[in-house]
Amino acid sequence: MGNSVMGDLSSQLRVAWHRVQDWAYPDQIDHEMYRAYMKTPHDVGGEPDAPALFEDKEEEQWELNTFVTCEVLGWRGIWTSEERRRIGNVDLGRTNYLGLPYYGRWLWAIARVLVEKRHITLGELIERVDEVRERWADDPGRAIDAAPRATGDTEAVARNRHHLEAAGKGDPQCFAGTAGTPGFAVGDTVSVRDLPTIFYTRTQEYLRGASGTVAKVSYESLAPEDEAFDREDQGSEWFYIVRFRMADLWEAYTGPANDTLQAEISERWLRAAA
Amino acid sequence: MAETHRDGSGHDTHQHAGTAPMVEEVTDFEVLEIALRELAIEKGLFTAEDHRRYTEHVEQLEPAAGSRFVAKAWLDPDFRRLALSDAIAASREMGIDWLHPTGFGTPSDFTAFEVLEDTPTLHHVIVCTLCSCYPRPILGMSPEWYRTPNYRRRIVRWPRQVLAEFGLYLSEDVEVRVEDSNSKHRFMVLPVRPDGTEGWTEEQLAEIVTRDCLIGVALPRPGVTSNAIRPRHPAIRPVTGD
């Protein structure tokens, strides 16, 4: 197991404190506890963990198929990859985020988006899953692959504007010239706002409140908070690669003082540092 | 319950032969994947041909493209300048079009690519702490360890310790710069050309630029032409070429 402590069970035995009472009373959740509950489970940078054996993995056929289906749904304007990341990396909750296989979450996201965007009903999905399972119960030697009963009318499907507007340009190039003048320039000192986390962001918790230097004015794009919710009606903004000193990010950083880290952050999250 | 005609053949396929050979059970993931793909095609969200074409695109991706890119940058100063100023254009010069296969790029990789130039006093290493962002058009699919919460948690906070676990020990006069690939840019490391490679051809140089070097968890060395050997978790039903 790549994430275990080298299979050493003793080191994994530890005292755990569980609340006996589910659903704490409101006065039992202070700001820090609330922040912990609301933290998006995909934002793991800086969490303590033990050294592990870094492993490779052979890919399952269903994993490749799942990846391709996700990408084709993006290609054909059913979603953007940011919607996929929000659904499959955050919406499903911390327990499933850390428990399911990597592509098991991608698959979960496909199911979720097709139902939520009304392309299929949940009833259809439940019946189809049951039927597919019985196919192999009935005929175990059957090749494991999809057998669509029909080819649907591709013209009748609601799709996003993005897959058309980005054609021939690319993404983020399709947003070029839409965000006005950048608020910051290379060399500016900026700080990362400590905004509350609600549902989704790509500004990591470990950067909140830290000051750094703009290393590159990147591109214009919709912010992840909008793109993840299919808000094509919203305006774009500038993104910046910001360079931080490790010693400014982590208490008691033990490496040399000139070690650095860079991340790419949208303008709404930055302020000119005092 | 109606159990017939499930396969569209017109034959009753409902048999529970007690003598059927034992086979691996079809997993929940396989069942759900098939159900969703069938429904998506039947509803017209995409076609089976779309799925097949995209699969072909994915299957021809490999890190060798990144290795050639670096070898060319080591040998050709004009290409190196282009690689550092416009890595998308440099990729195109090598036959890699980031707009493929959709006309606007791969949905998850975008079309913003940046090459991170190492120097004798600066070493880059790449991570995506939020998911597993990776430059698939030039490096193919990311390795399993790159996706793990463990690597993502630790490399941004204890980079030298984690690099040491990969066998890469950096002295204190080398600045470690971690690139958290958290938005639309994708990154690849351009390592320093190692001593002992004088007079080598592009092909010879490309051989020592392993995928791990391009992520920044290893350095190219004469005589080392593959990633470190790691345990490989096997698949139940691995990807098979048609």
Image (cartoon, coloured by chain):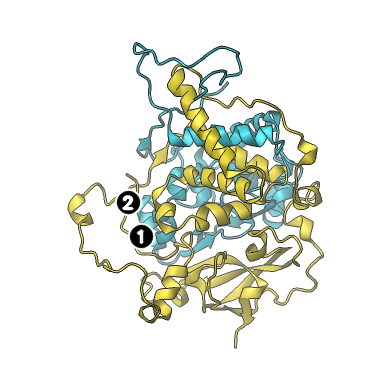
Query: Is residue B7 visible to the viewer in this orientation of the structure?
Result: yes
Give the letter of the chain under mark 2: A
> What residue did someone put label 2 on?
A52
Amino acid at the residue labelled 1? Gln
Amino acid at the residue labelled 2? Ala
Quarter of the image for residue A229 reads: bottom right
Q: Position of residue A25 (x, y in %)?
A: 37, 76
Q: Position of residue A36 (x, y in %)?
A: 42, 71
> What residue did someone put label 1 on?
B161
Q: Dot 1: what SS?
A: helix
Answer above or below: position of A128 versus A249.
Answer: above
Question: Marks 2 and 1, how far apart in space?
Answer: 12 Å
Q: Residues within 10 Å of mark 2 (few under 14, many from 20)?
A: some
Q: Residues within 10 Å of mark 1 (few under 14, many from 20)?
A: some
Instruction: From the viewer's side, name the closer residue of A156 and B121.
Output: A156
Answer left or right for B169 relative to A66. Answer: left
Q: Colour of chain B?
A: cyan
Query: Is residue B199 visible to the viewer in this orientation of the structure?
Result: no
Give the letter of the chain under mark 1: B
